[in-house]
């Protein structure tokens, strides 16, 4: 039975996960019958074209491109100085000259140049984090038949997305790994669990997709019973063969416990859930000096590079959702089929 919203055989979306995947995972999930996703926010024009060519050459199934819609604030010298003062002991430890760091954003929101790149490929689904792009961009996507999805972390955000052009809402609970999709309020206390959020959002006039902490067939069955159109799953794919998850990240995932993840702004400036490591323990998960998204990543990436060269994951964003189950020696098709055992056609 074809999913009416995603036009896929199975009611599952592989969540886009920047830094731990490329188009190979996207294609694998598409070929397994789900909706494979490609994270595009950090790709250059050339990289985006290359990944789209790979997808086009390896599958004829629907796929999803994911972009960010954040507003990029200024990153002042004062903010940079305050942030560097916090990180100074680490710069000294790793012999890093922070005076050479720029104040340029490493991730840009979707714009017309990106639309011009992807339009010839007519991606069947385009999803967004941190809201929605301009109405002009949305109209161009819908003109080629693209389905528009976006993440909501509260019922208010879900209503906003419905009113502003989303074809379906991804209800992202607090348990989800990686970045929160919030955009109307940065108050994390407003974000409910996935179950709570789904129960509120299924009353919308557009389809709802559950996301956050989904790791078993029983979870999938639970959300189908609540009335969702599909589920979106990310962390369950982190250890699969097609993922590009680094060795240090994989090792951390193998020993993760139910209480070892935490929301942190250290790595990008926006709250994201990952496995607690050295820098989170020593500085606190959300230090007030962390600059706004995406500027925190400039200095943290340099520290990560030096530490990882020594086999140290203490400065690595080890993104992972709650309730993670380590499944080794498994591929994306097997993960997809395992989870979809809980979905009744």
Image: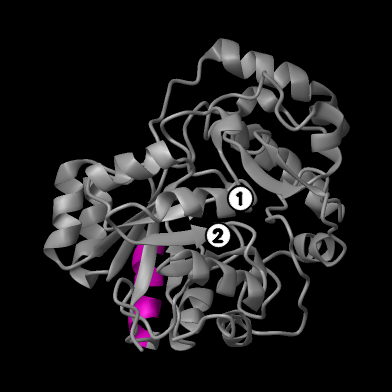
**Snapshot quadrant of residue 81:** top right
Please provide the residue range marked out in magenta: 47-57
| Of 39 and 164, the residue lying toward us | 164
Question: Residue 126, position in %: x, y?
Answer: 32, 61
Q: Residue at x 70, y 84 (%)?
A: 330
Assign a secondary structure to mark 2.
loop
- Tell me the residue that label 1 is attached to: 178
Question: Residue 131, position in %: x, y?
Answer: 36, 41
> Left or right: 63 with respect to 270?
left
Question: Height in image: 125 above or below 18?
Answer: below
Q: How busy is the neighbourhood of tag 1: few (under 14 within 10 Å), some, or many (20 plus)?
A: many
**Snapshot quadrant of residue 74:** top left
- Tell me the residue that label 2 is attached to: 17
| Of 236 and 70, the residue lying toward us | 236
Question: Height in image: 254 above or below 309?
Answer: below
Assign a secondary structure to mark 1.
strand
């Amino acid at each position: 039975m074809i999913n009416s919203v995603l036009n896929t055989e199975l009611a599952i979306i592989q969540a886009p996960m920047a830094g731990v995947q490329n188009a190979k995972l996207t294609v694998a999930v598409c070929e397994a019958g789900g909706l494979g996703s490609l994270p595009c926010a950090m790709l250059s024009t050339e990289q985006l074209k290359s990944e789209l060519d790979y997808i086009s050459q390896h599958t004829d199934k629907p796929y999803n491109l994911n972009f960010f819609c954040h507003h990029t604030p200024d990153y002042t010298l004062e903010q940079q100085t305050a942030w560097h003062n916090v990180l100074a002991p680490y710069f000294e430890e790793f012999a890093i000259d922070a005076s050479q760091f720029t104040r340029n954003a490493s991730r840009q929101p979707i714009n017309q140049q990106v639309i011009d790149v992807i339009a010839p490929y007519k991606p069947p689904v385009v999803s967004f984090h941190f809201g929605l792009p301009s109405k002009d961009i949305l109209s161009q996507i819908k003109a080629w038949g693209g389905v528009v999805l976006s993440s909501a972390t509260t019922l208010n955000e879900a209503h906003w997305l419905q009113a502003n052009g989303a074809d379906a809402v991804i209800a992202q609970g607090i348990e989800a790994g990686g970045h929160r999709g919030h955009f109307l309020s940065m108050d994390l206390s407003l974000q409910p669990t996935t179950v709570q959020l789904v129960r509120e959002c299924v009353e919308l006039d557009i389809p709802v997709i559950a996301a956050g902490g989904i790791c078993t067939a029983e979870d999938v069955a639970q959300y189908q019973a609540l009335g969702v159109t599909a589920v979106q799953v990310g962390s369950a794919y982190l250890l699969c063969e097609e993922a590009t998850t680094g060795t240090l990240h994989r090792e951390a995932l193998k020993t993760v416990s139910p209480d070892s993840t935490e929301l942190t702004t250290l790595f990008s400036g926006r709250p994201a859930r990952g496995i607690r490591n050295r820098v989170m323990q020593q500085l606190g998960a959300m230090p007030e000096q962390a600059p706004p998204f995406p500027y925190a990543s400039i200095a943290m990436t340099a520290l990560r590079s030096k530490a990882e060269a020594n086999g140290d994951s203490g400065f690595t964003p080890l993104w992972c959702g709650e309730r993670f189950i380590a499944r080794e020696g498994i591929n994306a098709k097997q993960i997809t089929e395992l989870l979809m055992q809980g979905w009744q056609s």
